[in-house]
Amino acid sequence: MAAIGFIGVGNMGGPMVRNLLKARHRVTVFDLAPAAIERCVEAGADAARSIQQAAHDNDIVITMLPAGKQVREVYLGQQGILGVARPGTLLIDSSTIDVATARDVGAAAQNANLPMIDAPVSGGVGGAQAATLTFMVGGPEAAFVSAKPILATMGKTIVHAGNSGSGQAAKICNNMILGISMIGVCEAFVLAERLGLDRQKLFDIASTSSGQCWSLTSYCPVPGPVPTSPANRDYAAGFTADMMLKDLRLSQDAAAATQAKTALGALAARLFEAFASAGMGGKDFSGIIELIRSSAG
Ligand code: NAD
């Protein structure tokens, strides 16, 4: 049994905490939202009143925060994790953030004698609840080996992608594929509508042909073929278009910084920007089919 501090217990962090508790770890949680803390306390966690309380006397500290800005504050700020954790505490950041912040915070942790990995996840809220997340890990081998059993209580697939920041690199590359492929699937369904092709027929054929992909078979953007997809509940998220846009922007920033040419990634970012600007950012990202349908002329 490990003593774990967990900071950021929202949609993803909350269910991850519940799986750590099920595995009989002692978990102390902190969040800016008292209601999020309360839900974890009801599940058996201890409440902390500050980052310091959650981080200072634990074997492991895990963070699941919105973006790089919060990760910098929580780790590097006054009374932040690096200033209060005892030497040797294993630090795991599972937020999806930019590679540069992950590397900066990882280097600062190493200087403070604190082993740290970036370990963003794929699998969404459903994966967090079912403990089937995929963890993409960047950081020193020894820290990866120590973290693996803990990550295994919250996920199913755990891959060491490379040195510090490599987990975030893998995450933004994966989500760039996801954003582009969802738009491709949406365009195919809109074209099928124009051609008078039945959506179920397109699904039956494409899902067993070379057009098969996760956007089609798990998050099919039209109602019917995949009963669990957000299209069947008016595009209630799921994975919001705002989150997709955040990840596409991260991939575009990384592409600019490394002079990689990602023309489709850039176009996908622009389309999701237009969708979010139309007030649809809180909808599931598969709802972008409505933008594509309405701009089809
Ligand atoms: P969320 O907004 O539900 O949870 C984030 C929590 O962090 C909130 O409860 C917020 O109050 C808390 N927080 C913010 N700043 C804080 C601070 N300074 N100190 C303490 N707590 C603070 O978001 P989420 O959906 O749980 O996503 C968390 C991360 O996981 C994001 O980086 C997101 O990109 C990533 N992610 C989300 C999904 C998904 O489907 N929701 C899937 C994969 C990855």
Image (cartoon, grey):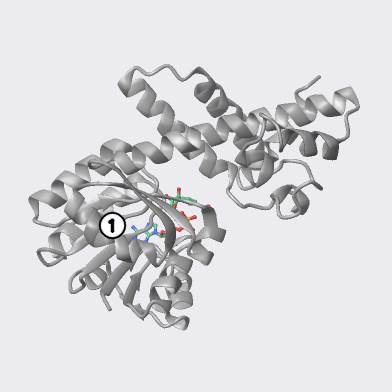
Q: State the SS at label 1.
A: strand
- Camera-nearest residue between 209 and 262: 209
Q: To which residue does mark 1 refer?
A: 92
Badge 1: residue crowd in 10 Å (few <14, some 14–19, many ≥20):
many
Residue 60 lies, in percent from the top left, at 24, 67
Q: Amino acid at mark 1?
A: Ile
Quadrant of the snapshot with the N terminus: bottom left
Question: What residue is drawn where x is 50% and y is 17%?
Answer: 263
With respect to residue 109, does 89 lie above or below? Answer: below
Residue 40 lies, in percent from the top left, at 44, 76
Question: What residue is drawn where x is 66% and y is 29%?
Answer: 210
Q: Quadrant of residue 155?
A: bottom left
- Camera-nearest residue between 139 and 297: 139
Residue 132 lies, in percent from the top left, at 49, 60
Q: Quadrant of residue 48?
A: bottom left
With respect to residue 40, does 176 lie above or below? Answer: above
Q: Is residue 77 visible?
A: no
Question: What residue is drawn where x is 46% and y is 37%?
Answer: 174
